[in-house]
């Protein structure tokens, strides 16, 4: 499962999908080659394959997730992004998606570099640790925040590398990764009008979705 | 030794598409136009292959599934075995409504060459001498087995297989099919297998072969002419191999240190323990249905298997077609307690396929049943097979014959 546990991310029968996943799906050209890393139960992948006709593959750590995906006819391997990404040739995919998984990586920086190597584009979404409710929880309660989207206690969370939107954009900058598009989501996964680099976005955004490419790749 | 097996004519290829019907234990003579060249250099002409088919070939011949059997398997994949009287070795997986659904797919399973259930092998009569081949039979490889299967598929008028599936040695054949004939295989489902036979596995096979050859009744491989059989050697080979198919956890659960029909150990070498008597039973029943020389030849074929070797030592190169990835859709499955073909072996194949950006799925099934799990009731595994085939069928445009399951 995704480190942000959400069992109902897609309703297979109605073909609907969670709003933030829909947002990612909207960024993907129909018919393209897509690798979804940490694809969980395959909700996004299933949507992309069946609604947008992509040639989709997935990597998932949990056995349950892989079983669900493969049993539903999706091409998914059981594996660890941090060890398996290096096998893929450069430019193997049009899009590499890392949805709500970056914060669970041991080496998020290396993973980011691999994403833009393997994919012409990488789409990365993550929960913003600079979100005001999280800041408030820490400030007022003095406790690690447990929110609807970050529903784990500190001692059991798979999320080990939290960052804020500002942290993320500055890392991209340092890695010479261009941010082509960014969407900041407020409460209920709804996109806001906030600009990504903005301190306001970092304060009011609950999560960010970014489309990246390695600097020098054609825009 | 196959005199008791009824011989039936192979189906007439001239039969219209869609009419290649169900039947078990057919035999066909292949290599009639042109001999088949083996890896060892020998040419086989007019050789027999025994096979079974289940289900119906559709009009555009796009629903054929080749099932490849393991070391001691045969083509009685889902029907009753003529010697043992037991249900077929994959009757849980192959049949109407089962994961490899014979209501939907046309299933072909052939006895490998070198085998002893009707295909040409060391126990068959050499037309040149009128006697059994024995050790005069050429050494065969996994690729040779697959070449013969390809001739069979051609004979049945099938241009492209929908899927090739098999476990263990059968999985080696699946990989070989995908590498030798990537344009003739839509999907490949190698289970509990490896792209090469490991040193440890070769070592176990050598123990088995030495057990057979150490039996005085083996007679240098000429036992059929001498009117004897190396029963004991073959039984020992089977006992040793059988241990490698299980796991400590499975053996412990089944037998522990329980004694066999007695209250105390006998301070002798009877089968005091249940596990001993189980293994002896495995050995004894095996010799009824298997030929010792076939065991030598087929284990050797597995030993020689190394897909990377013929591709410059780089496994990924085996899965390159021209400059792109193989068009075959793969799904690999391993079992967590399999120490004969451990998950790392499957993962090596997955990594090689990733390296060419091929379409691959991979599932490790958690079980304590060891290598044998691919032959046993493992619902998760069966679900994976069903799901993968369903997904591939959708891509291949194969319509469902029955209402879709959720």
Image (cartoon, coloured by chain):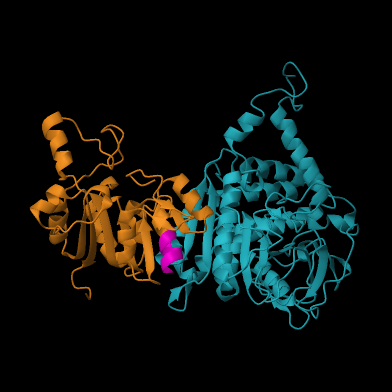
A181 above or below A208? Answer: below
Say which quarter of the image contains residue B262: top right
Q: Chain B is drawn in which colour?
A: cyan
Q: Is residue B333 magenta?
A: no
Q: The orange chain is which one?
A: A
Look at the picture and state if A204 lies above or below B403. Answer: above
Left or right? Give the position of A78 relative to B72.
left
Q: Quadrant of the N terminus of chain B?
A: bottom right
Residue A148 lies, in percent from the top left, at 28, 40
Relative side of B135 to B325, left or right: right
**Is any part of residue B119 visible from this angle?**
yes
Residue at 8% x, 52% y: name it. Answer: A199
Q: What stretch is highlighted in magenta?
A: A46-58
Taking the spot 61% from the left edge, 65% from the top edge, the residue there is B163
Q: Is residue B406 left or right of residue A167?
A: right
Along the line of sight, the residue nearer the viewer: B320 or B217: B320
The extreme top residue here reads: B263
- Residue B168 lies in what quarter of the image? bottom right
């Amino acid at each position: 499962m995704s480190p942000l546990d959400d069992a109902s991310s897609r309703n297979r029968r109605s073909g609907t999908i969670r709003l933030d996943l829909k947002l990612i799906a909207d960024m993907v050209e129909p018919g393209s080659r897509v690798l979804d890393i940490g694809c969980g139960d395959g909700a996004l992948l299933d949507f992309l394959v069946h609604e947008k006709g992509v040639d989709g593959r997935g990597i998932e750590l949990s056995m349950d997730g892989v079983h669900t995906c493969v049993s539903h006819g999706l091409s998914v391997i059981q594996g660890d992004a941090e060890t398996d990404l290096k096998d893929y040739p450069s430019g193997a995919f049009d899009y590499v998606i890392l949805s709500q998984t970056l914060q669970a990586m041991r080496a998020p920086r290396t993973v980011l570099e691999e994403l833009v190597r393997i994919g012409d584009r990488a789409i990365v979404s993550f929960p913003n640790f600079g979100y005001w409710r999280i800041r408030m929880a820490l400030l007022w309660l003095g406790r690690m925040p447990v929110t609807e989207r970050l529903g784990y206690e500190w001692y059991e969370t798979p999320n080990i590398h939290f960052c804020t939107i500002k942290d993320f954009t500055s890392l991209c900058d340092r890695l010479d990764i261009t941010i082509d598009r960014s969407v900041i989501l407020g409460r209920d996964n709804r996109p806001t009008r906030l600009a990504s680099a903005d301190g306001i976005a970092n304060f009011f955004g609950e999560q960010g979705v970014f489309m990246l490419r390695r600097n020098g790749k054609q825009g | 030794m196959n005199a008791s097996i009824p011989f039936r004519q192979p189906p007439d290829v001239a039969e219209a598409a869609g009419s290649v019907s169900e039947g078990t234990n057919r035999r066909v003579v292949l290599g009639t136009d042109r001999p088949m060249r083996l890896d060892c250099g020998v040419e086989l002409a007019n050789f027999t292959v025994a096979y079974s088919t289940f289900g119906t070939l559709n009009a555009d011949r796009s629903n054929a599934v080749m099932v490849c059997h393991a070391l001691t398997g045969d083509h009685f994949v889902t029907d009753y075995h003529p010697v043992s009287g037991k249900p077929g070795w994959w009757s849980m997986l192959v049949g109407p409504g089962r994961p490899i659904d014979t209501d939907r797919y046309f299933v072909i399973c052939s006895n490998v060459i070198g085998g002893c259930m009707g295909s040409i092998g060391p126990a068959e009569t050499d037309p040149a001498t009128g006697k059994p081949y024995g050790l005069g039979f050429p050494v065969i490889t996994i690729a040779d087995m697959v070449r013969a299967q390809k001739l069979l598929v051609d004979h049945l008028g099938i241009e492209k297989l929908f899927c090739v599936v098999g476990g263990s040695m059968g999985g080696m054949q699946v990989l070989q099919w995908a590498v030798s004939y990537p344009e003739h295989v839509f999907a490949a489902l190698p289970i509990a297998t490896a792209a090469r036979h490991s040193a440890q596995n070769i070592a176990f096979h050598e123990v088995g072969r030495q057990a057979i050859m150490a039996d005085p009744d083996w007679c240098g491989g000429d036992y059929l002419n001498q009117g004897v059989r190396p029963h004991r050697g073959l039984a020992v080979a089977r006992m040793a191999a059988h241990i490698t198919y299980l796991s400590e956890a499975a053996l412990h659960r089944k037998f522990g240190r329980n004694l066999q029909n007695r209250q105390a150990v006998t301070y002798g070498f009877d089968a005091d323990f249940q596990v001993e008597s189980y293994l002896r039973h495995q050995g004894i029943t095996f010799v009824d249905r298997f030929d010792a020389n076939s065991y030598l030849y087929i284990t050797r074929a597995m030993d020689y298997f190394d897909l990377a070797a013929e591709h410059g030592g780089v496994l990924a190169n085996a899965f390159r077609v021209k400059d792109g990835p193989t068009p075959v859709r793969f799904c690999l499955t391993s079992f967590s307690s399999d120490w004969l073909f451990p998950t790392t072996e499957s993962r090596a194949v997955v990594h090689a396929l990733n390296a060419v950006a091929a379409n691959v799925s991979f599932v490790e099934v958690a079980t304590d049943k060891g290598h044998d799990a691919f032959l046993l009731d493992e619902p998760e595994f069966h679900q994976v097979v069903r799901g993968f085939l369903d997904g591939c069928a959708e891509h291949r445009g194969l319509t469902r014959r029955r209402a879709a399951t959720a």
